[in-house]
Amino acid sequence: MGANLFVNYGEAVAAVLFGIGFGNLLLQKNLIKKIIGLNIMDSAVYLFLAEKGYIIGRTAPIVTGGVQSVEAYINPIPSGLVLTGIVVSVSVSALMLSLTIRLYRRYHTLDLDQISLMIKKEEET
Amino acid sequence: MTVFTYLLMGFLILCAISVSLSKNLLNSILIYMSYSLIMSIIWVILESPDLAITEAAVGAGITSVLFFVTLKKIHAIGGKERSDEQEENGTGIS
Amino acid sequence: MSRKKTEQEYRKTFAFHFFRWLNGEKDPYLGEVEMKPQEPYKETEEEVKARIREKNMISRRLYGVAKSKEMKGLERFYKAASIIFCCILIYLLLFTVSYLPPVGTADRPVNNEVPQRYIENGLQETGAVNIVSGMILDYRAFDTLGESHVLFVATVTVLILLRLDKKKKNDGEISIEEAEANDRIYEPKNDAILQMAAFVLVPIIIIFGIYVILNGHLGPGGGFSGGAIIGAGLILYLNAFGFQKTERFFTEKTYKWISFGSLSFYCIAKSYSFFTGANHLHNIIPKGTPGAILSSGLILPLNIAVGLVVACTMYAFYAMFRKGGF
């Protein structure tokens, strides 16, 4: 372990959240919980990116009072990247939820094991 | 300020773990909603107000509403008799 | 003699092939394309019983007491292995994080000359006071164009997945699936408290959303957040007053024209630079004084276009989840 683990606590939290979301994807049987796990992984990545651009003692990148030196503002690039990412993640989760509704209408359950067993049975007959 | 950030970060992890452990789907979605709200506060602390507004409107608002509508569609909330019937059939949802 | 062509002649013309291709009957590469909608899944009483029996059997086999020992062992092994895998993943990520340069210092590799250029020249080059807004709608506007198309494509896909055919309603009774999707029949309406709260809140929410969109180049906000706020206001209105009132001003046609108009406006405004041969859009619109509402050239109209697309998309998601269509 390096020396910066506790200085970089925000990034460490992002790493832990990513692991928890991945565990959700692996361990949960319910499809909706899996989707929530994917959303948690999403926001962990966003948190990591936003921590990258943060600089202590500087303000948000909105020009105030005509000051235009680099020393006054934080890095605007991660903010722009994350801004587009958040809106895309909504459309991704909407797409997955609609797939879930279709699966429920067809198989009347949300348990992934049962669904795959039924699919196997349908293929046999 | 640092103590406040530590608290928020801890709460974030707590929320993420309790989403995974909660048995009820409605509960886990509510917890996910609070997770998004805490995320938006963290973004104010990280000096990105654009992200804070977007996350508060999108993450805590619209995503959760979509999750709720999905639960309604799959009969996981409301409809007492339906859930009883499902328990009889052994097809509990959560 | 009439000028109408005979059937045989018409079949040879270009227009015949074009319209067949347009209607999806024939693909030049694949040949005849079958355009049948998927058969709805119908089941009789016995099939339901058989399904329940089968499900009980499956769940007994999966979760029951009489579970076979190998399955149990395999499941336990799977759980243990995935927990161990997650722990290893978290450990590796933390190990990497611990060697990264400390957060909050200015001399990290992220803070190179690119953000320096954006901060030092952004106000003069784009005219936007909010540097993030100037960045995503001027320097990197193609990225945002692609992203608004992602939203549009997602709406189309959800529409394909959740749409209900309205043609099969002729026999007077509503099928189960349709009744399930069509919440209007079961929902209690005229909830006085909800309607009063929505009556007060919805105008405020929508005006706040418009404010956020219009001030996207002056302060925090912009098309994405403002559009999401307006969409949330529309969803609240829909919940309080029902579909009949919203269908007066928002139907499938409205969605189509608003999305089409905004996306093509964005596309034309930004792909203008392809035709002029320059690598950036030269000023047609004057930048104005920074800080005024009518300033910063194209950023304000582009913000409005993005905001309209996002608001329509959010409302459309909700309406399609509720009743399968607008």
Image (cartoon, coloured by chain):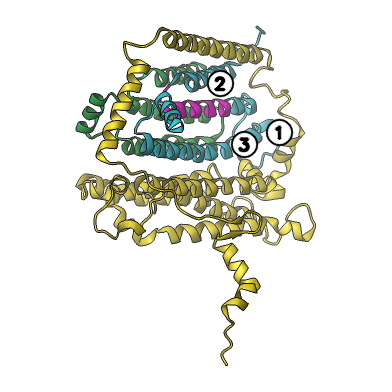
- Magenta residue span: A29-47
Tint of chain C? yellow
Disc 3 versus disc 1: nearer the observer: 3
List the residue tagged with mark 2.
Answer: A14
Chain containing mark 2 = A
Chain containing mark 1 = A
Tint of chain A? cyan
Residue C6: x and y, percent? 58, 81
Disc 2 versus disc 1: nearer the observer: 2
- Quadrant of the frame with the N terminus of chain C: bottom right
Location of residue C281 with respect to B89 vertically, above or below: below
For the point 47% across and 11% down, which residue is it? C74
Query: Who is closer to the viewer here, A96 or A106?
Result: A106
SS class of the residue under badge 2?
helix
> Does label 3 or label 1 sit earlier along the sequence?
1
Cα separation between marks 2 and 1: 27 Å
Chain assigned green: B
Task: Tell me, yes or no, whether the highlighted magenta stretch contains residue C279.
Answer: no
